[in-house]
């Protein structure tokens, strides 16, 4: 059973140092590599009402944990300027943004369009599913295989995904392991 | 007998040399990494003074004893200025696990009055041992992940 959060729930969370107990930034957005199926880093805002963007980014390797209420880092040195960050964090490929993409199964059925990412809470942010807008107007969650073909307009998921469409994050959390086991991963 | 921050806040601080009251305990300065009280803050506002733990000759149930008023000093750095203002207090601060989950607020802290070491923190409904304390600052007290939070 995995505890999951969506990327939009992570946006706005304070970034807190474990040793210092200080909220030194807050999450602006998640940087995601859809083909690898994982979070690669976070962009940041300053804390407070007059918050603007912070230049530094937080690479996924430097995240101590992502929780319901905060993103934990060891200390302020975990934040790095884009020049010092891995390329995938500093310059994420914009054509790899999956939000709004059509989700097609291998037999050519559209399940809907990608609305949000579902990440595992507690670790460093493995992306295990998507929240989708279904064509009938409703919302649902689908699990993802570890690897995925992504074009920038559409992404192709296994046919089995149709049996694992779930109504909420809890349902998705319960379905992910079973889904991947059925795929033989 | 252990003491607690709630019980000891407001306690008189007395000079052994003059038997005068130098002030009352307003805040505790804690080194989270060492799980130890490093200093007490006396008074509030601009008149607030610190006394380092090693200058205490006794932390008694009725008074805290120091040698004389030479043991009192002003804040040395930014962190101590925050401490004097109560910004770094553990009491009533939100408690986060190192996993990033809030588990309530710190309602009290118990310590050994002989050594100044932190024994336990009361968080929400339960108590966590002092050894679970990882860090503290103006935003949060950070605790070791609870067993229920460990990945199964």
Image (cartoon, coloured by chain):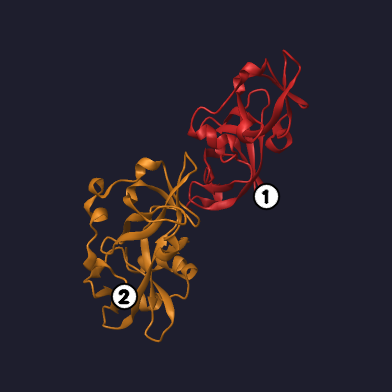
In this rendered view, identify the residue nearer to me: A47 or A43: A47
* Residue B65 horizontal side relative to residue B40, left or right: right
Residue B29 position in % (x across, y down): 58, 32
Q: Name the residue: 48% across, 72% down.
A: A168
The chain drawn in orange is A
Residue B116 position in % (x across, y down): 63, 26
* Residue B28 horizontal side relative to residue B8, left or right: left
Residue mark closest to the camera, 1 vs 2: 2
Q: Quadrant of residue A131?
A: bottom left
Against A43, is B128 above or below?
above
The answer to whether residue B32 of the structure is visible from this angle is: no
Classed neighbour count for the residue bearing mark 1: other residues with Cα under 10 Å, few (<14), some (14–19), many (≥20): few
Task: Tell me the residue that label 2 is attached to.
Answer: A100
The answer to whether marks 1 and 2 sit on the same chain is no
Farthest residue, direction front: B46
Task: Tell me the residue that label 1 is attached to.
Answer: B125
Dot 1: element: loop
In this rendered view, identify the residue nearer to me: A185 or B122: B122
Q: Chain of mark 1?
A: B
Q: Chain of mark 2?
A: A
Q: Name the residue: 34% across, 56% down.
A: A43
Residue A183 position in % (x across, y down): 32, 68
Classed neighbour count for the residue bearing mark 2: other residues with Cα under 10 Å, few (<14), some (14–19), many (≥20): some
Picture quarter with the C terminus of chain A: bottom left
Against B78, is A121 above or below?
below
Farthest residue, direction right: B62
Q: Name the residue: 57% across, 32% down.
A: B30
Chain B: its colour in the image is: red
Dot 2: element: loop
Against B19, is A28 above or below?
below
Using the numbered discs, state the Cα–Cα distance from disc 1 to disc 2 in whole angstroms: 44 Å
């Amino acid at each position: 059973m995995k505890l999951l959060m969506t990327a939009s729930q992570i946006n706005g969370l304070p970034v807190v140092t474990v040793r210092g107990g200080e909220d030194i930034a807050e999450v602006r957005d998640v940087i995601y590599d859809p083909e690898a199926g994982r979070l690669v880093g976070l962009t940041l805002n300053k804390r407070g009402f007059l918050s603007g963007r912070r230049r530094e980014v937080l690479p996924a390797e430097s995240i101590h944990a992502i929780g319901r209420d905060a993103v934990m880092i060891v200390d302020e040195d975990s934040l790095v300027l884009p020049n010092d960050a891995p390329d995938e964090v500093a310059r994420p490929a914009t054509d790899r943004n999956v939000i709004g993409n059509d989700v097609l199964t291998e037999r050519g059925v559209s399940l809907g369009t990608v609305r949000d990412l579902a990440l595992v809470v507690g670790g460093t942010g493995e992306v295990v599913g998507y929240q989708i807008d279904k064509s009938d107007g409703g919302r649902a969650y689908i699990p993802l295989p570890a690897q995925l073909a992504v074009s920038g307009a559409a992404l192709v998921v296994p046919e089995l995904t149709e049996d694992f469409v779930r109504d909420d994050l809890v349902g998705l959390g319960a379905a992910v392991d079973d889904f991947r086991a059925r795929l033989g991963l | 007998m252990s003491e607690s921050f709630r019980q000891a806040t407001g306690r008189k601080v007395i000079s052994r040399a003059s038997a005068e009251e130098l002030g009352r305990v307003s805040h505790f300065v804690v080194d989270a990494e060492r799980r130890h009280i490093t200093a007490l803050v006396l008074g509030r506002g601009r008149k607030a003074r610190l006394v380092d733990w090693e200058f205490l000759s006794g932390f008694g149930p009725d008074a805290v004893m120091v040698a004389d008023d030479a043991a009192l000093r002003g804040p040395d750095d930014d962190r101590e200025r925050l401490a004097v203002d109560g910004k770094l207090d553990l009491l009533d601060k939100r408690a986060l696990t190192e996993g990033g989950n809030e588990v309530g607020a710190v309602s009290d802290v118990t310590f050994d009055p002989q050594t100044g070491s932190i024994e336990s923190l009361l968080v929400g409904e339960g108590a966590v041992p002092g050894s679970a304390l990882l860090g503290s600052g103006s935003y949060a007290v950070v605790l070791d992940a609870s067993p229920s939070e460990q990945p199964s």
